Image (cartoon, rainbow, N blue to C red):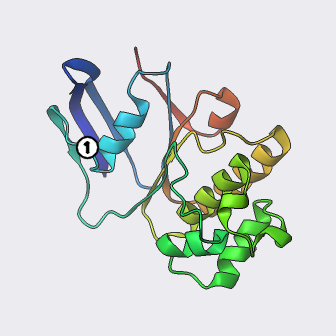
Amino acid sequence: MLEAVNVSKAFEGRPVIRDFSARFAPGSRTCLMGPSGCGKTTLLRLLMGLETPDGGRVCIPEGTRFSAVFQEDRLLNRLTAAGNVRLAARVPAAQAEKLLLALGIPAESLSQPVSAFSGGMKRRVALCRALLAEYDVLTLDEPYKGLDEETRERVMRLVEEHTAGRTVILVTHAPEEAVGYDLIHLPV
């Protein structure tokens, strides 16, 4: 089981996380909420092993595979949407394109480089890539930012369908995005 035990982290002497503990059971859905700057993104990075805690420990079961949507989309602008997805998810182009269409990427955009995409379209490509990668734990750092309400609701439903039975850790400021998740409120 993924677990944080008394984890602390500081940057340039400024504490960001202090003595945080939590367990993330297989198949659990957890939402981290709190004000900007309280350490939500840092906590995700610690849980994925991308940062090392200054105190305490993060227990990552051997062989755990992570997939992530970071705050930045991290796409290669010269590649198509499916090309970006297939860098991380070893799936046929047709499978990537099917999910991209379901996420609301227009069919006529599939042949274009993502440099021509809007911010919301790029966000959905990043989500598609994370959903189709092989993973045990999916971390989502404000995955729905830049999406209008109708698109956000459709994308949230698709995320729920594609993550059934898997561990999901979501960071958001929007309570409506946290419905169905166990909440952890991080202090300032």
Helix, strand or loop at label 1? It is loop
On screen, residue 40 above or below 132:
above
Q: Viewed as shown, does residue 94 lie left or right of 140?
A: right
Extreme residue in the top direction: 188
Q: Amino acid at mark 1?
A: Glu
Which quadrant is home to the C terminus?
top left
Looking at the picture, how far across and down is residue 87, in whole percent? 49, 73
Using the rendered view, name the quadrant where residue 177 is placed.
Answer: top right
Nearer to the camera, 24 or 128: 128
Residue drawn at point x = 79 percent, y = 51 percent: 154
Residue 178 coordinates in the image, percent (x, y)? 62, 35
- Labels in figure, total: 1
| Residue holding disc 1 | 51
- Residue 160 is left or right of residue 185, and the answer is right
Image coords of residue 109 (percent x, y): 79, 68
Residue 34 rendering spot, x and y as whole percentages: 49, 21
Tell which of 186 and 22 is nearer to you: 186
Give the answer, above or below, for where 98 lies relative to 33: below
Identified at 59% across, 57% down, the residue is 126
Q: Furthest residue to the left?
A: 55
Q: Is residue 175 left or right of residue 54?
A: right
Please report the residue visible at 23 percent of the width from the left and 63 percent of the height from the top.
Answer: 62
Residue at 26% x, 53% y: name it. 60
Most foreground residue, 8 or 21:
8
In this view, the residue in front, 149 or 176, is: 149
- For label 1, count other residues whose C-alpha is less than 10 Å away and answer few (under 14), some (14-19) or many (20+): few
Left or right position of 125 against 32 = right
